[in-house]
Image (cartoon, rainbow, N blue to C red):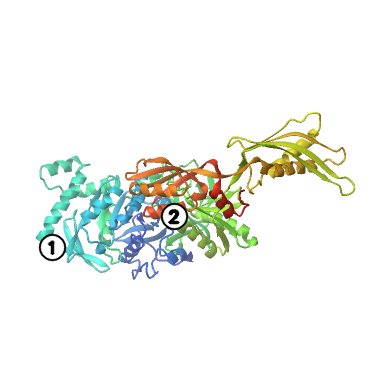
Amino acid sequence: MENTINGKGSAAGSTPRCIALVGPFGSGKTSLLEALLARTDKLQRQGTVTDGNTVGDASPEARAHGMSVEVNIAETDYLGDRFVFVDCPGSVEFLSEMDGALSGVDLAIVVAEDDERKVPALQLILKALEARAIPRVLFLNKIDKSSRRVRDVLSVLQPASAVPLVLRQIPIWEDGQATGFIDLALERAHVYHEKEASTQVDMSDEDRARELEARFTMLELLADHDDDLMEALLEDIAPDRDLVFSDLVKEMRDGLICPVFFGSADHGNGVSRLLKALRHEAPGVDVLKYRTTDRETGSLLQVIKTMHTQHGGKLSIARVLEGEVSDGDSLFRNGRDEVKVSGLFSIFGQHASKTATASKGDLVALGRLDDVATGDLLSHDQGDLVSMDAGERRSPVLATAVSAAQRKDEVRLSTALAKLVEEDPSLSISQNQATAETLLEGQGEMHLRVAQERLAGKYGLDVAVHTPHVPYAETIRGKTKVRGRHKKQSGGHGQFGDAVLEISPLPRGEGIQFSDTITGGVVPKQYIPSVKDGVLDALTRGTFGFPVVDVAVCLTDGSYHSVDSSDQAFKMAGILAIREGLPECKPVLLEPIHKVVVACPNDATAKVNAIVSARRGQLLGFDARPNWPGWDEVQALMPEAEIGDLIVELRSATAGVASYTSEFDHMAELAGKAAEQALQKSGKQQAA
């Protein structure tokens, strides 16, 4: 991020309101941000995503892929009111960016379009807003490309919303094109102008009739929550305009309705009307404060995003909910640990401008708060603070094994990975002890690709990635009795250890058991632990090259030499006995089986069942997803080897919205061709 000092200041006066731009991938959120900034004269010229000159999506990764991969922030003012817009990615793989941002916004503009395929993705976003009681309006974008009546489009989108989508405008049509709109609350008609504010015109008789019908529908929906308005409608009395506006504002803020506006972000149509609605109807930061915590405090900040810049270090982007904060202030993280602000910046796209103080409502970046994480609350006062507005934790659905291409970069890689996870909590790092791999886990192919690009571009690291290995194991079906004798004479003291072991299988999940029945001192007591060490060492790599589990080993006999026997000699005797005995015990390969729960729209359930079955999954059934109308949850037991790229196929079959959770269930025997293929992929010895 570039640091500049002399950035243009915001309008003085009102407490700024923070507005999130959310919506499915490709719906036009970044274009709408550009139109909002251009209409408020923050930009001299409106850029386009195609030309790569927008305020948002300016990071190298966003430019390279032509999509939002992180939140973008821009402040502007409109008629004396200040607004901070937070443009959130729409891809399901980057929704965690939205999750963090929502904890600091007063209202969300849901950007949608006339595309039935994106309704499930729209539902994902609306559910996140509904769960956190965030007021919202819907902006139906690309009205210039829609060939259907807006009312018909709303009937397609309505299943995605738990509350009524209430049309606030109807279009004026001319030769099949929307050339303007009629405001149903103000009962005024306007015509569009390219990248300029619309102008008011008289309504035709036909448009007046359409307006009366549409307005009555809007009033009926509002009357569901207002008895006075219902009474007026029943008595055929024209309701007072102030009452209509009051109901529209109250019911939107209470989450009872979602008002719908429309326009074209690319052409700047409908943008002024949207800004006027935000100015008069969006709630302020006080509402957010009481949604966030139930504790009174002199000052309060909510951290919505963590960033690591190449030259400026760590930045914690936070919304000031109460009071003010200055550079150099000492704050308490969640009311407990003390931290000190080292630098205060206002954000506009990729630029950070130094500022001395941030006041209530501002969205600022705080420098070098090393122990502060996204989601934390900061205050000047001590005493436990707990956020009531925590977003959901998204489970990883795809993993890649990552390592430094050069050994000297291993420490740098570890540090860079930690920073990536701090910036994006939906990424995770884990160590697979069984395969000795570092796993980078995320929300999908593009999510992991962007993470790898950041490692290369931002941190200058050359990394190697590959598909993670499956932690196979092996066990035995038969039993045997075997002698392991280690004898070596090379001058001076020799080496001698002699152990007789009985090897037998155990039930699945019992692990490894070692015992002895030595009597008469044929193996001195001090050497029995050494035999055990040798057994455990040998069982780490069995007949097929994998760890051996569910085996009982009993030391029954042996012999020793008073001079040449030693701990090391008896350890070697245990190793030799296991290596010789395991092939005689009918060894079998084991693979990990996971319990998988797939969430998908119910019109894709049959496809999901087929995908799971084709991947050797055992279907356990499916049921309606709780509190998700139109969605199912498919439960199955699946081999871990088949889960690796499962999300790619699931998303392909569900317009990009399916997800799943997975947890280890048990180990199961793997034989025949499947076992041979597993051994070939892992480079181990083939089964006999």
**Which residue type does callout 2 highlight?**
Val
Query: Is residue 285 something one can see in this rendering?
Result: no
Q: Secondary structure at mark 1?
A: loop
Relative horizontal placement of residue 579, taking residue 214 as reference (left or right): right
Residue picked out by circle 2: 648
Q: Residue 566 at what x, y percent from top left?
A: 82, 41
Q: Residue 368 at what x, y percent from top left?
A: 53, 56
**Which residue type does callout 1 highlight?**
Asp
User: Which mark's residue is nearer the viewer, 1 or 2?
Assistant: 2
Nearest to N terminus: mark 1 or mark 2: 1
Depth check: 609 or 597 in front?
609
Quarter of the image where one finds residue 583: top right
Relative horizontal placement of residue 546, taking residue 92 as reference (left or right): right
- Residue at left offset 73%, top offset 43%: 575
Depth check: 520 or 37 in front?
520
Q: Residues within 10 Å of mark 2 (few under 14, many from 20)?
A: some
Residue picked out by circle 1: 202
Query: Is residue 678 something one can see in this rendering?
Result: yes
